Amino acid sequence: MKLDRKEILKALETITIAGEGKNMVESGAVTNVITFGDEAVVDLVLHTPAMHIKKRAEDDIKKTIHELISPDAKVKVNIKVESPEKPEIKGRAIPGIKNIIAVASGKGGVGKSTVTANLAVTLAKMGFKVGVLDADIYGPSMPIMFDVENEKPVSTTVDGKSKMKPIESYEIKMLSIGFFTAPSQAVIWRGPMAAKALNQMIFDADWGELDFMLLDLPPGTGDIHLSIMQSLPITGAVVVSTPQAVALADAKKGVAMFMQDNINVPVLGIIENMAYFTPEELPENKYYIFGQEGAKNLAQDLEVPFLGEVPIVQSIREAGDYGRPAALQTASPIEKVFEEITRNVVQETVNRNESLPATEAIKITTMAGCSAVKKN
């Protein structure tokens, strides 16, 4: 008995692969058929690694050849799995924005947003063009801190496309989900919805020319952080912590997230907030309520720069609540504190840009992690 290759191909046209409409010959799944006397070798390419589909395809081929060609045929099926390439979500730089700095914290309540607001106004006072993206979707606080909580972004046309115009306050351009929701309204969104909103505020906005965009990230290390790092090539990250052990443990995780090989965002340094308490009537006294130099020691342990410490001063809290960041208080100790920290952030950014290539955005590859891909 001698098998005929054309007859086998015709027989295989009667079979479809599970999940595909065309027969396995027409779809290109059968890449080759070789016959040697009473032996037939069928080369098959599948686009799914599922074991049950592979097994069923093999069984169907053998059964069909035995029924339609010869029950005595010796059939071998070689199956190769080629997964179709998925479109990569590549982070793309926003034209006109030179440096994107993520301000993060391992846990909530350490004053990350307050630090972000004061960094922003200090950078602006130094002559830089600054923008703030409030990426804390579930707890947006920038509108309050800049006294613009009742403002609404308007639409503007740029190169024939409709874009959001960021709200401006104290020479800072900003966007926040807080501009699009009522002050009393809770944002109850799943990750994909939050990520979509962030992408709109990033790419569908007329940011113009900026020297620094500060990203006020939510606490922790979660879905929003990955979405941001998928969308944008971040220049570097600043981690804010308070000195006590509980906060430091979480700050350590925050630093570790950025330093992972598959994320690889340079950590510009750590800022210690609420470092000590100084009463207004006793400006020389320092009371280390939460412990002393915890974040400074953590920075040394992790071998990342220590950017400075911010004391607990009542005026910082009041200024944030009143919508005028404390660093705007000229000739005050707080102004000097934030000037020193901001100079350190700028210097570390310059050092990073001189010594390292542009950051690559990341792509989610599996449920277990991410991998680096080059940006556009």
Image (cartoon, rainbow, N blue to C red):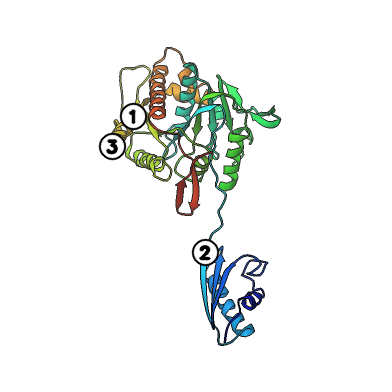
Which sits earlier in the primary sequence, circle 1 or circle 2? 2
Q: In the rendered image of this protein, does residue 69 appear above or below residue 49?
A: below
Kindly identify which numbered label has been placed on residue 81.
2
Amino acid under label 3? Asp
Say which element carries label 3: helix
Q: Badges 3 and 2: C-beta atoms under 8 Å apart?
A: no
Amino acid under label 2? Val
Q: Badges 1 and 2: C-beta atoms under 8 Å apart?
A: no
Q: In the rendered image of this protein, does residue 70 appear above or below residue 46?
A: below
Say which element carries label 1: strand
Q: Position of residue 12 (x, y in %)?
A: 63, 75
Mark 3 — residue? 301
Whether residue 137 can be seen here: yes
Q: Residues within 10 Å of mark 1 (few under 14, many from 20)?
A: many
Label 3 vs label 2: CA separation?
46 Å
Quadrant of image for the N terminus:
bottom right
Label 1 vs label 2: CA separation?
50 Å
Residue ID at (55%, 39%): 137
Q: In the image, 245: left or right of 87?
A: left
Mark 1 — residue? 306
Quadrant of image for the C terminus:
top right
Amino acid under label 1? Phe
Front position among marks 3 and 2: 2
